[in-house]
Amino acid sequence: MSTPFGEEPKIYKVLVYNQLTPDEVSKTNIDIKKMSFWDISAGVPGKSSVDDPHISVYWYGPTVSSEKGFVIHLKGHKLDEKFTEPIRKVVERIVGGTSSAREMGTEFKNFTMKITYDSIMNLAKSIQSAGKLAAECSLEFEMVTKEEKAASTLPKTKILGEKALEK
């Protein structure tokens, strides 16, 4: 059953923010335990990283994948190796863990980086510097109350999607 038009749900099953700057990520005030996914995408400045060549570093939380939150992924999408190799080295240094090559990218299992808003911001800024690319972040949350959404420090204009918890 969906929410009647115009009524805000009491709880959002999924709430996604997109095109966040690293600094916006560091100021996030939604409980980090509610985060189910984050992504840092870096591409050529002035171009959208979604369609154009870019690199993504991302993590799925323990409730959304069989990886149980123990893997961070790095994938290049049509991006020249002169950009991806320095970024891979920086990510490897910051993220830690065991790295292995997978499907056009690298997986970092049992990584040592603590998942915090500051660590995601620092990783995004390091990726920007290493690749001389523009980075933007996406954050996805689960089970966010309407009060938490209203009090969120993230820009309302950067909400990419939301799904109400169905009763």
Image: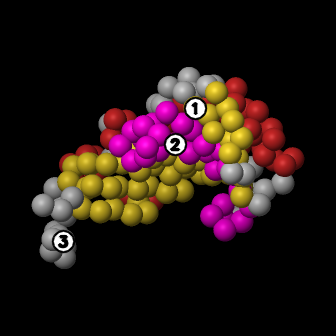
- Residue 159 visible in the picture: yes
Left or right of 91, for residue 22 = left
Where the C terminus falls, by quadrant? Answer: bottom left
Badge 2: few (under 14), some or many (20 or more) residues near its Cα, within 10 Å? many
**Height in image: 31 above or below 133?**
above
Give the residue type at disc 1: Lys
Which of the 4 quarters of the picture holds residue 36? top left
Q: Residue lying farthest bottom? A: 5
**Height in image: 101 above or below 12?**
above
Residue at which label 2 appears: 59
The span shown in magenta is: 48-75
Q: Where's residue 98, x and y in %?
A: 64, 27
Please name the residue shown 61% across and 25% down the image: 97
Between disc 1 and disc 2, whose residue precedes?
2
Q: Where's residue 15, x and y in %?
A: 35, 55
Q: Where's residue 73, x and y in %?
A: 60, 43
